[in-house]
Image: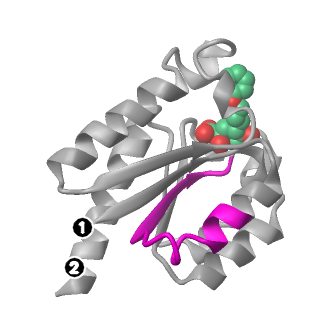
Amino acid sequence: MKLLLINGPNLQLLGTREPGIYGSVTLADIENEVSALGSTLDCSVVARQSNCEGELVTWIGNARQENFDGIIINAGAYTHTSVAIRDAISGVSLPAVEVHLSNVASREEFRHHSYLAPVCAGVIAGFGKDSYLLALRALVSRINAQKQ
Ligand code: CA2
């Protein structure tokens, strides 16, 4: 199994600022932990980060041709604004899990709406880096269940 882990705008700053909201782990820490858990689940994880909406759209759109079986995505602030990323997820027809470090439901009103959630298999938010690890486990079980 091969999964694509996508992180969106400003997530490269993790561990350097706002530790009160996002914790002190770095993006590299998260990517390494997800990859290590993936290995124990027979699954390789390719991690990418971009601040550009179009690049995220392109990665999602090409995911099938690149032989990915599913997508874990923290689209950052684009979660709350991007019809283009929603359309890309919807169009690629691969299972995707939306992830957030923080509990977006307990934050500002503008973070309560996700354009992506309706086209994702599920959403995991509020558990810091564990959100990603939970998402990986959930996605692997979903893909394995669909194979049977
Ligand atoms: O909680 C999450 O994972 C978010 O996706 C993070 C986004 C935010 O816009 C979403 O509403 C919720 C922000 C990512 C910015 O990350 C930073 C990390 C450290 C310092 C500054 C920004």
Point out the stretch of residues depicted in magenta. 58-75
The CA distance from mark 1 to mark 2 is 6 Å
* Left or right: 84 as drawn, with respect to 99: right
- Mark 2: few, some, or many residues within 10 Å (few <14, many ≥20)? few
* Left or right: 31 as drawn, with respect to 142: right
Q: Residue at x 71, y 65 (%)?
A: 58
Q: Viewer-proximal residue, 128 or 72?
A: 72
Q: Viewer-proximal residue, 12 or 131?
A: 12
Residue 123 percent coordinates (x, y): 50, 59
Q: Viewer-proximal residue, 36 or 108?
A: 36
* Left or right: 144 as drawn, with respect to 125: left
Q: Residue furthest bottom?
A: 148
Mark 1: amino acid = Ser
Q: Residue furthest front?
A: 66
Residue 126 percent coordinates (x, y): 50, 39
Q: Residue at x 74, y 59 (%)?
A: 113
In the rendered image, is residue 133 in sight? yes
User: Dots 1 and 2: beta carbons under 8 Å?
Assistant: yes
Measured along the vertical axis of the image, is residue 145 above or below residue 102?
below
In the rendered structure, does residue 59 fall within the stretch colored magenta?
Answer: yes
Q: Residue at x 54, y 70 (%)?
A: 63
In the rendered structure, does residue 16 fall within the stretch colored magenta?
Answer: no
Give residue 130's quadrant in the image.
top left
Mark 2: amino acid = Ala
In the rendered image, is residue 115 in sight? no
Q: Which residue is mark 2?
A: 145
Residue 106 percent coordinates (x, y): 64, 40
* Dot 1: element: helix
- Tag on residue 141? 1
